[in-house]
Amino acid sequence: MSGKRVPLTAQWLGLALIVGLLPARAEAHTALQSMGSFWAGVAHLLTSFDQVGFLLGLAIWTRFHEQRLDALVIAAAFVAVNAGAFIGAAFVQPNTFDLTGPLAALLIIVGAAGAARLRTGAAALIGVTAIGGAMAGSVAADAAAGFTLALFAAGGGLAASAVLSYGLLAMRRVEVEWGYIALRAGSSWVAAIGLMVLALAIARHFGRV
């Protein structure tokens, strides 16, 4: 049975590496204009590669906790992305802030935690999920102009929940020690990519890039 589980896990690890190697969040605002509000919210998150990388890293980290926490993490991501979109739309002026650096820092945190197979319990896990989800939603607020915000936010929240859900379904199938090592290696890639993106964000802030 275990031999049949390897390809699925390998596909998810490959996806995580591909996502991580892409340098930054995709600017897909123009392409989203042809979609409805809900699907634009879905597409915006799925084309924001730093956010998808964060969610995949979070899925690996969550895998090393008790399975009962899976539903809480998925629900927290959905709520946080929704809330973040409304907060961003209400309190943040368009194009006045850049969360690339903070999101990269979260990539480092979840990547390092997963690589270390760290079990922190529900509070830290849900807290990081909520912070990351709120950031993702706030970033999406810029792209929500011209759309129905509630539908756009719901689409982003559903996309985040789906990435976590399918990621956890795949990763929960890993039941052999070398599979855990592969997951930890993938998580370390998430942290490494986050470190590179953070370095680029800092360099750009100081005018070096």
Image (tube, rainbow, N blue to C red):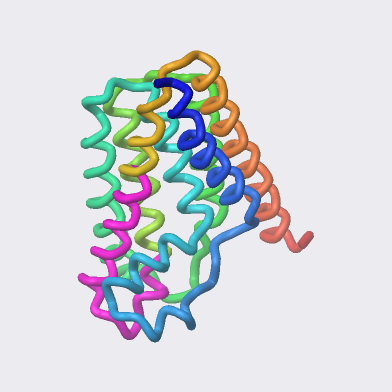
Residue at 32%, 62% in the rendered image: 156
- Residue 202, image x, y percentages: 67, 52
Q: Which residues are magenta?
A: 140-164
Majority secondary structure in the magenta region: helix
Q: How many marks?
A: 0
Q: Residue furthest top?
A: 177
Question: If the image is split into quadrants, where does the N terminus sit?
Answer: top left
Residue at 52%, 41% in the rendered image: 11
Q: Nearer the viewer, residue 37 or 127?
A: 37
* Residue 27 shown left or right of residue 79 in the figure: right
Question: If the image is split into quadrants, where does the C terminus sit?
Answer: bottom right
Residue at 49%, 29% in the rendered image: 6
Q: Is residue 63 above or below residue 21?
A: above
Quadrant of residue 168 within the rendered picture? top left
Determine if the magenta segment contains residue 155: yes
- Residue 120, image x, y percentages: 36, 21
